[in-house]
Image (cartoon, rainbow, N blue to C red):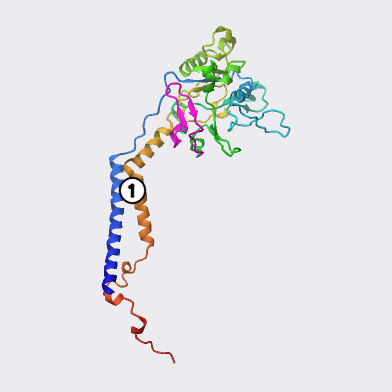
């Protein structure tokens, strides 16, 4: 009996030594991997040469919201109400059923359009179709994809698992989950790519009466935006409507606004395919101040560094081994019986135990 117990205790010691060795090896592997593969963020992806997009000029927008209605119709989205009477579609922000919306900047008396002081201005909110989109990078099942030719960030509901990582990852807060549906999915602008086969393009640009929303290749739209910025405020110029290549029958003459000398989306977050012009500072009309580098370029590098060569699994298993070992109590670890022979530590049967003196 004593011999079996002695063998068992020896096995326990060997097992603990083995676990200690595993923990040490895991730590060594982690350190070696970190040293040998330092994290170096990849370059931010650029817009494809033939990328498609939109140019929104807030100085031309009259706030009619025809683009909002056209988007709803083109994508077969239901109305959303923010008033008690429910007389018409009144969404307050983009959602799983509203992919495009016009918001309003207000200040003081609101007496002058496109004035920062005592004025008002409009701003269109929809998917920016980033050159290096975080939603695509964060999606674990490739439900979010970026077309290599058009650059359109598309969504596949058949692949989606509803994790909503894309919702959290987007710096513009665009992908939205349809919480009102038992089979909810993500809703976002896809530049009406489903209409291209019928000779149509983005519905919001098709119906805009002033050309505030213009469709075309991003490179052409960027050139048009810079052309406008170079013109003196108050001068007369020709503005195309609908598509930038729509021809003279879709253009008109109008006055040049007092633009902020910046094309929003040219460099923000690595560049976007939806570009914007405004007379009011972009931060005041709701556009986030973003660096010229996409966070996807950094986050992907961190993930690949941690999981490359099974670094993270080794570290996690090592930590679990350490916690398990720390929480298991061993008598021979505390030194109470370190010098006592194993035979003396064996519990004796009750009939062999010395009789205890009785208390008087």
Asked if residue 136 lies left or right of residue 25, the reply is right
- Judging depth in this view, the residue of 254 and 160 nearest the camera is 160
Figure quadrant of residue 99:
top right
Asked if residue 251 lies left or right of residue 24, the reply is right
| Residue 358 visible somewhere in the drawing | yes
Q: Position of residue 197 (x, y in %)?
A: 52, 18
Quarter of the figure that contains the N terminus: bottom left
- Judging depth in this view, the residue of 54 and 271 nearest the camera is 54
Residue located 33% across and 40% down the image: 308
Residue located 52% across and 18% down the image: 196
Check the image and name the residue furthest to the right: 85
- Judging depth in this view, the residue of 59 and 350 nearest the camera is 350
Check the image and name the residue furthest to the top: 248
| Residue 339 visible somewhere in the drawing | no
Residue 154 drawn in magenta: yes
The answer to whether 35 is drawn above or below residue 272 in the figure is: below
Q: Position of residue 299 (x, y in %)?
A: 41, 37
Please tell me whether the stretch drawn in magenta is mainly helix, strand or loop. loop
Q: Position of residue 272 (x, y in %)?
A: 47, 25
Q: Position of residue 54 (x, y in %)?
A: 52, 20
Asked if residue 19 lies left or right of residue 145, the reply is left
Residue located 27% across and 76% down the image: 343
Which residue carries the number 1 mark? 314
Check the image and name the residue furthest to the bottom: 360
Helix, strand or loop at label 1? It is helix
Asked if residue 221 lies left or right of residue 324, the reply is right
The residue segment tinted magenta is 136-162
């Amino acid at each position: 009996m004593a011999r079996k117990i002695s063998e068992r205790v020896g096995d326990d010691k060997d097992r603990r030594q083995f676990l200690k060795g595993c923990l040490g090896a895991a730590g060594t592997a982690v350190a070696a991997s970190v040293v040998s593969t330092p994290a170096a963020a990849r370059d931010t992806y650029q817009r494809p040469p033939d990328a498609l997009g939109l140019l929104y000029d807030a100085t031309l927008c009259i706030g009619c919201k025809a683009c909002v209605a056209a988007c709803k119709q083109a994508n077969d989205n239901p109305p959303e109400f923010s008033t008690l009477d429910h007389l018409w579609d009144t969404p307050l922000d983009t959602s799983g059923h509203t992919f495009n919306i016009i918001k309003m900047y207000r200040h003081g008396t609101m007496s002058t359009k496109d004035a920062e002081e005592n004025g008002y201005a409009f701003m269109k909110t929809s998917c920016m179709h980033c050159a290096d989109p975080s939603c695509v990078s964060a999606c674990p099942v490739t439900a979010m994809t970026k077309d290599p030719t058009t650059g359109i960030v598309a969504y596949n509901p058949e692949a989606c698992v509803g994790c909503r990582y894309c919702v959290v990852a987007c710096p513009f807060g665009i992908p939205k989950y349809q919480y009102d549906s038992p089979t909810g999915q993500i809703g976002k602008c896809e530049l009406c790519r489903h209409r291209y086969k019928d000779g149509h393009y983005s519905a919001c640009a098709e119906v805009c009466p002033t050309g505030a929303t213009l469709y075309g290749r991003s490179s052409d739209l960027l050139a048009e935006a810079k052309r406008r910025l170079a013109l003196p405020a108050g001068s007369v110029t020709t503005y195309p409507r609908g598509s930038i290549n729509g021809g003279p029958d879709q253009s008109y003459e109008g006055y040049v606004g007092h633009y902020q000398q910046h094309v929003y989306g040219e460099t923000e977050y690595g560049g976007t395919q939806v570009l914007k012009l405004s007379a009011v500072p972009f931060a005041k009309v709701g556009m986030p101040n973003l660096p010229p580098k996409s966070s996807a370029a950094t986050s992907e590098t961190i993930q690949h560094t941690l999981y490359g060569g099974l670094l993270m699994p080794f570290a996690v298993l090592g930590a679990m081994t350490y916690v398990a070992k720390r929480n298991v109590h061993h008598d021979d670890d505390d030194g109470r019986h370190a010098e006592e022979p194993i035979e003396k530590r064996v519990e004796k049967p009750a009939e062999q135990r010395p009789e205890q003196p009785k208390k008087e």
